[in-house]
Amino acid sequence: MIDESLFKKKELYPFQDKVVKQIIEEILNNGQNFNLLFQLPTGGGKTVIFSNIAKQYLQKTGKKVLILTHRIELCVQTSKQLTALGVANKVVNSVVKLLEDQGEFQSFTAMVETLNNRLQENSSFIENIGLVVVDEAHNNSFRKIFQYFKEINILGVTATPLSSNKSLPLKDNYDKLIVGESIKSLIEGGYLSNADTYTYDVNLHGLKIGVNGDFTVSSSDKLYSNYFMQEKLLFAYEEIAIGRKTLIFNSGIESSRAVYELFKKHHYPVRHLDSTFSESDRKDILEWFKHTPGSVLTSVGILTTGFDEPTVETIILNRATRSLTLYHQMIGRGSRRLSNKDSFQVIDLGNNVRRFGYWQDYIDWNDAFNFPDRFLESRLSEEDDMMFEAEYELPRNLKDKLKDPSKLEGFSMRDIYLDCIATGRKGKDAVDISLNNHFEVIAENSADMYDGILLLEELQEDVERRLKHYTKCITKTTDSYLSWLKETYNRQLSQRIRAELAAE
């Protein structure tokens, strides 16, 4: 007999109760082999919803329920909720090799990799399953499990019904999508905290896109570990979030450790956490974070799911991502509502808001589910457009030398090119206009020809950036053409410097 007093039973909110009934009705009315996907924002209570669905399904069908997750923390949370509801359940972890006592349980919660290993050894490892619930269903690692279960129902649950693999859309596995409450309605209903978002333009030049469609860890680490990005992060924190409990998301361990050293140097209460930490160390750090006012925790990936700390007041996205799912997961870590917390802060240092819109914005999830390619293409810049995303920022040492840095920073090759085309001029005129702009800046900040030549050397990054923009505009992107264009540009600019500044 389960002692329910050991666990806190969470009562369903009206919107949760409504969706539990809706999903149960859909499953029962459509029979076996009907797979349903349910979308609900992070913080909307997905665990309590599918735990109640599991209980009602058991009562109505007599068949058992299997709940799949990809984090042990999610297994434990789910198990506790099921126990509180009076459902006899068992967590299948790495210690569980056999299920000789499975007759004593109505529900099983397992990590996908652990269960897959058991099923490979014995395809009848778990029997009499009628419903498989997949938490974080956008993660494609769950597909390998489905082959072991026939004549069942699958319920996928996710905040973002977009597959983690573009070539394996969710609609291939699920027959229907049910869209839950929107973020805006959950905020208005008092279930989620609202987000006050602060954006800082950053230059993402140098980021590379990997095979998974997102920016690579190596290029992100290199960018976000440099002095200028570190300086911008510290400025943003001190301007917006100082003294508030802050969770910082990074792309890689190198950049997260750099953030730790930066904040430690400035005497802020900070810890770093990544997947290489032991379970005990991780527990100690999270306890410290929970109980330390104004604490700062810089992390890598590990806290995007399965982590619930309602006292978080500020989320800093110290990274860029092309994943809408990850974007919502990170911001959602700050959305938990408390009696003294009806809002939280989001600081974006990766142009993510520009890429995806504000976290609270309406999203047509049915469009995302039914037409994922079209949906993503309308929101994401392609690799060739990456250089156009952010306004250019001059290196600080160069910026300090110039009388008016805005003459360089405000120059947009693409805008100039489009203006030339729109007014009937040649596109190549944009290159001449750019060269004139560079010369004006050099002349304004040089005492003589020698100063001008030295300044031209320091401007090479800006020269290359503009010319790359130009080649993208004309869709002529070969390396040889860019090299020729850059050589010609620098030669003409150098000749002009020698001719016009030598007489001064």
Image (cartoon, grey):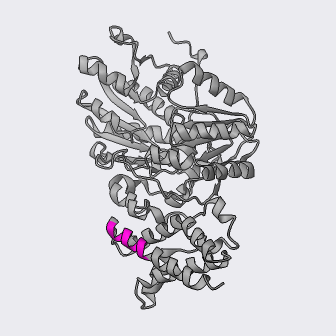
**Figure check: 90 above or below 250:** above
Residue 100: where, in percent of width, then height? 32, 8
Q: Residue at x 54, y 66 (%)?
A: 457
Residue that protrudes farthest toward the bottom in the picture: 424
Q: Residue at x 50, y 63 (%)?
A: 389
Q: Is residue 232 visible?
A: yes
Q: Which residues are magenta?
A: 480-488
Q: Residue at x 40, y 21 (%)?
A: 107
Query: Relative to 133, is 306 on the left or the right?
Result: right
Query: Relative to 300, is 56 on the left or the right?
Result: left
**Figure check: 205 above or below 53:** below
Residue 413: where, in percent of width, then height? 49, 75
Asked whether 200 or 182 is in front, the reply is 200
**Figure check: 175 above or below 481:** above
Q: Is residue 8 visible?
A: no
Q: Is residue 278 magenta?
A: no
Q: Main secondary structure of the magenta part?
A: helix
Residue 78: where, in percent of width, then height? 49, 26
Asked whether 391 or 374 is in front, the reply is 391
Query: Relative to 496, is 88 on the left or the right?
Result: left
In the rendered view of the protein, which quadrant contains the C terminus?
A: bottom right
Residue 382: where, in percent of width, then height? 39, 61
